[in-house]
Image (cartoon, rainbow, N blue to C red):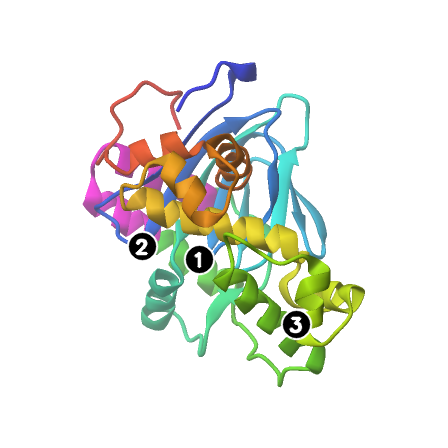
Amino acid sequence: MASARDGEWARHWQYPGVPGLDLLRARYVRHSFARHSHEGFVLGAVRRGIEDVVMPEGTIRARPGTVVMINPEVPHSAHAGVPEGWSYATLYPSSGLVAGIAQEETGLRGTPGFAETIVEDEDTAQLIRAVHRAAEEGNALAADTLLRIAVARLLRRHGRSLPARPPLAAGTRTALLARELLQERMTEPPSLEQLAQELGTSPFALLRAFKAAHGMPPHTWLTNARVRAARRLLEAGTTPAAAAAAVGFTDQPHLNRHFTRIVGVPPGAYQRERARTYKTGDEPPP
């Protein structure tokens, strides 16, 4: 998907030769990512410019030669760190794919993840870009091999076993129940006050508990959940307009706005890429 706006362009796709992997290659200038999280991992390598990634612990500056590693369900947002924006290649391997590599190639036990969010690692950054090139050339053997080498290297250098969750405090239990209710009523969610009343607490107590448990307020979490649901519908062939209605957005423009700010491309472009096995359009080189 090419854009004339400030030279921005992006491609978010899946390569059938490597199951369990999404790929995003893009140049952004004015685009910003709203606060969101992913079910799987994020491994990003900036090629030019600077991307500011806002993590729970603060903002990191992703420059050429660095690799950004974000664990599943960690909330974050991003925007350009310099006026000219940034271009990058990002891999989104599923939790199952990373767990399989960790089991085979590392001594990590339990749930694998990364201890750091950003590292200086030009060699692995080049590997991430090479995965994109191989996938876009339709070379499944190279794409799968390079992906596994990159993930195994990052796990050996920066991996850790993610801590087991401690027993849930009362506020956390309330936040989890609130999340379940919002998931069930995605198309017609209650107000914060109504939700708090159902759970036997106050609005501000619920808001604090929810942010502590999920890293974002309930309305932001719900938008993220709606976009995730819309992605699954689009992948199954549902039209963007029908997907918007099914997940609770007012209309297709409403879906377009939030989808683009979380996924990085509009829903129509996202869906079209699911029907392609390798790149056929003209885009800037990786």
Q: Nearer the viewer, residue 200 or 48?
A: 200
| Quadrant into which the C terminus falls | top left
Q: Is residue 153 above or below residue 127?
A: below
Categorize mark 2 by other alpha carbons within 10 Å: few (<14), some (14-19), many (20+). Answer: some
Determine crowd level at label 1: few under 14, some 14-19, many 20+ residues with C-alpha closer than 10 A: many
Rendered location of residue 97, percent (x, y): 34, 61
Q: Is residue 100 visible?
A: yes
Residue 130 shows in this picture: no
The residue labelled by disc 3 is 198
Magenta region: which residues?
124-147
**Residue visible at 46% across and 62% down in the picture:** 155
Secondary structure mostly taken by the magenta-highlighted segment of the chain:
helix
Would you say residue 171 sits in the magenta stretch? no
User: What amino acid is found at the position of numbered circle 1 in the picture?
Assistant: Gly
**Does residue 59 sit above or below 278 in this rendering?**
below
Is 31 or 63 nearer to us in this picture?
A: 31
Label 1 – label 2 distance at C-alpha? 9 Å
The spot of residue 173 in percent (x, y) is 63, 78
Of circles 2 and 3, which is in front?
3
Q: Residue at x 53, y 68 (%)?
A: 180
Structural distance between the alpha carbons of marks 2 and 3:
38 Å
Question: What x and y, as percent, mark residue 181?
Answer: 55, 66
Residue holding disc 1: 40
Position of residue 61 measured from the top left corner of the image (x, y, whole percent): 66, 41
SS for tag 2?
Answer: loop
